[in-house]
Amino acid sequence: MEPALQQLIDRQAIGDVIQRYARTLDWLDDEGQAGCYWPDAEVDYGFYKGRADQFLPIVMEVERASDRRWHMLSQPLIRFHSAKSASSECYGIFAGAKRQDDGKLAGKLFGGRYLDEWEKRTEGHGEEWRISGRTYLLDWQSDLTDQPEFEPDPEFPLPTARIDKSDHPLYRPL
């Protein structure tokens, strides 16, 4: 295959992993989240620095402690070093809310960036890209007070879903 075409395919594969990372956190999909990293990947989130396989139970516990969570990551800027290694950077926004002592939902909105290293390795029936190193940088944060409940607003009744455990009935493996 021509190198330029392969690089486009690889760019898309890396972008898919980044989107899967955000989605699997939001839906509390432990297995899907683990599939975004190589187990021996080194990650640095400030509050945790070490191997990905040891980080995953910690981050999923953090996510499960939120009554609502939402991650959105930008399209990554990717630089390939070889056919099997790359670096990327993308921006991310994360919102999380918990039930407060007064009964209201409140939390924080965070903005930051993901500095990732990637490796393409053979896994299962073929080669795949996964994160082999990650550094998260927090750029800003803001309070989110008095968040809406999980029932639709009667004045603008959009559907809602309370995702408080894995295997939510609306979750579809993609």
Image (cartoon, rainbow, N blue to C red):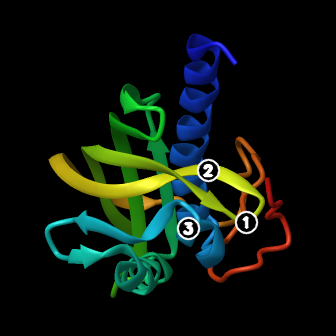
Quote the CA–CA distance across marks 2 and 1: 9 Å
Residue under label 3: 33
- The reply to whether dot 3 and dot 1 touch (C-beta < 8 Å) is no
Label 2: which secondary element = strand
Across and down, in percent, residue 147 comes to 45, 59
Mark 1 residue crowding within 10 angstroms, few (<14) / some (14–19) / many (20+)? few
Return the residue nearer the eye: 173 or 167: 173
Across and down, in percent, residue 18 comes to 51, 45
Q: Amino acid at mark 1?
A: Gly
Q: Residue at x 41, y 30 (%)?
A: 76
Tell me the quarter of the picture where residue 8 sits. Answer: top right
Residue under label 2: 128
Left or right of residue 46, residue 160 in this image: right
Tell me the quarter of the picture where residue 143 sits. Answer: bottom left
- The reply to whether dot 2 and dot 1 touch (C-beta < 8 Å) is yes
Q: Is residue 149 visible?
A: no
Residue under label 1: 124
Quote the CA–CA distance across marks 2 and 3: 15 Å
Mark 2 residue crowding within 10 angstroms, few (<14) / some (14–19) / many (20+)? some
Q: Is residue 84 above or below residue 21?
A: above
Which label sits in the foreground, 3 or 1? 1
Return the residue nearer the eye: 44 or 66: 44
Q: Residue at x 78, y 59 (%)?
A: 125
Across and down, in percent, residue 115 comes to 26, 44
Label 3: which secondary element = helix
Q: Residue at x 58, y 31 (%)?
A: 10
Which label sits in the foreground, 2 or 3? 2
Across and down, in percent, residue 133 comes to 30, 57
Question: Quadrant of the image for the N terminus?
Answer: top right
Return the residue nearer the eye: 124 or 139: 124
